[in-house]
């Protein structure tokens, strides 16, 4: 299977959800693969139809990890499959990514220069590494990952757009399993393909209201390798390496890493 076909296979086709993606199939440096039907990353679940939640239920989703803030959750609660457990792990006390504000209004009311979306996102990625709330959320995320040990149980984790807070969660998870960083970056950038229709629709509306904001709003709605690189730089500055950050800052020990590999990898 070529890369394009494999990427397309990962994008789940829902009626009212976007950027829902399988993390199965990625190969580790040791030659093992992440299991399919074990873990999904996504954007918000607040608009899902009954058919969508039934689809996720049939897929095996038993845990829904929500990285959004309390305000985001209150505005748009998740629609989850019957029998799934909902877990709130807010990365930020309020949505720094602006994704929820763009959902509310195409040209959002934001507290930074509205033409400076790119630099704002660089700040967001630094904060996801350095702020205590974010660190605690990702530490707790690993606890939930470790508890997802039922053979047919699937864990889903998400935020509003499924790209920033969710993106860093995927970085930590895949790296811990031994997936090489270039592959992790490919998964990160796949958001731009998986969210293309949604982003194009929003930008069309921005163009009609204020063309000067299109590039800035695009920077808020998409992912950029510069963003993840800023996070990795902050990780190196604070912990020396991504490996050390996971082991010391997020406190994932060697036994837990081995347990994660047993749960999520296959030969």
Image (cartoon, helix red, strand yellow):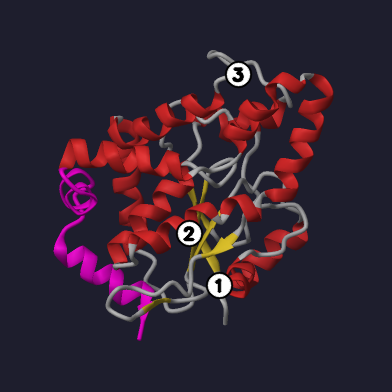
Q: Is residue 113 above or below residue 97?
A: above
Name the residue beneath numbered marker 1: 3
Residue 27 screen position, x and y as percent: 39, 75
Name the residue beneath numbered marker 3: 115
- The residue segment tinted magenta is 240-267
Left or right position of 249 against 83: left
Q: Quadrant of the N terminus?
A: bottom right
Label 3 packing within 10 angstroms: few (<14), some (14-19), many (20+): some
Between the C-alphas of marks 3 and 2, the distance is 27 Å
Left or right position of 231 against 113: left
Total residue callouts:
3
Label 1 packing within 10 angstroms: few (<14), some (14-19), many (20+): few
Residue 95 visible (yes or no): no
Name the residue beneath numbered marker 2: 186
Q: Residue at 16% across / 67% down in the picture?
A: 255
Q: Is residue 203 above or below residue 154?
A: above
Q: Is residue 233 magenta?
A: no
Q: Residue at 33% across / 73% down in the picture?
A: 28
Q: Quadrant of the C terminus?
A: bottom left
Label 2 packing within 10 angstroms: few (<14), some (14-19), many (20+): few
């Amino acid at each position: 299977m070529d890369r394009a076909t494999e990427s397309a296979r990962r994008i789940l086709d829902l009626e009212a959800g976007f950027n829902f993606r399988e993390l199965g199939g990625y190969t580790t440096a040791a030659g093992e693969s992440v299991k399919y039907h074990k873990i999904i990353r996504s954007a918000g679940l607040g608009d899902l139809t009954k058919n969508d939640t039934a689809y996720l239920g049939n897929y095996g989703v038993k845990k829904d990890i929500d990285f959004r803030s309390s305000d985001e959750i209150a505005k748009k609660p998740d629609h989850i499959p019957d029998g799934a457990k909902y877990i709130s792990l807010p990365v930020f006390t309020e949505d720094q990514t602006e994704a929820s504000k763009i959902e509310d209004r195409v040209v959002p009311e934001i507290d930074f220069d509205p033409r400076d979306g790119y630099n704002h996102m660089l700040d967001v990625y630094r904060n996801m590494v350095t702020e205590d709330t974010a660190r605690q959320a990702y530490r707790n995320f690993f606890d939930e990952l470790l508890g997802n040990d039922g053979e047919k149980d699937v864990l889903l984790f998400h935020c509003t757009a499924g790209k920033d807070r969710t993106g860093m969660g995927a970085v930590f998870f895949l790296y811990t399993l031994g997936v090489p960083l270039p592959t992790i970056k490919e998964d990160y950038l796949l958001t731009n393909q998986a969210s293309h229709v949604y982003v194009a629709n929003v930008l069309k509306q921005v163009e009609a209201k204020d063309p000067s904001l299109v590039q800035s709003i695009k920077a808020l709605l998409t992912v950029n390798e510069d963003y993840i690189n800023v996070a990795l730089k902050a990780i190196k500055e604070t912990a020396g390496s991504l490996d050390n950050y996971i082991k010391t800052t997020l406190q994932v020990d060697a036994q837990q890493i081995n347990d994660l590999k047993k749960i999520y990898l296959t030969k």
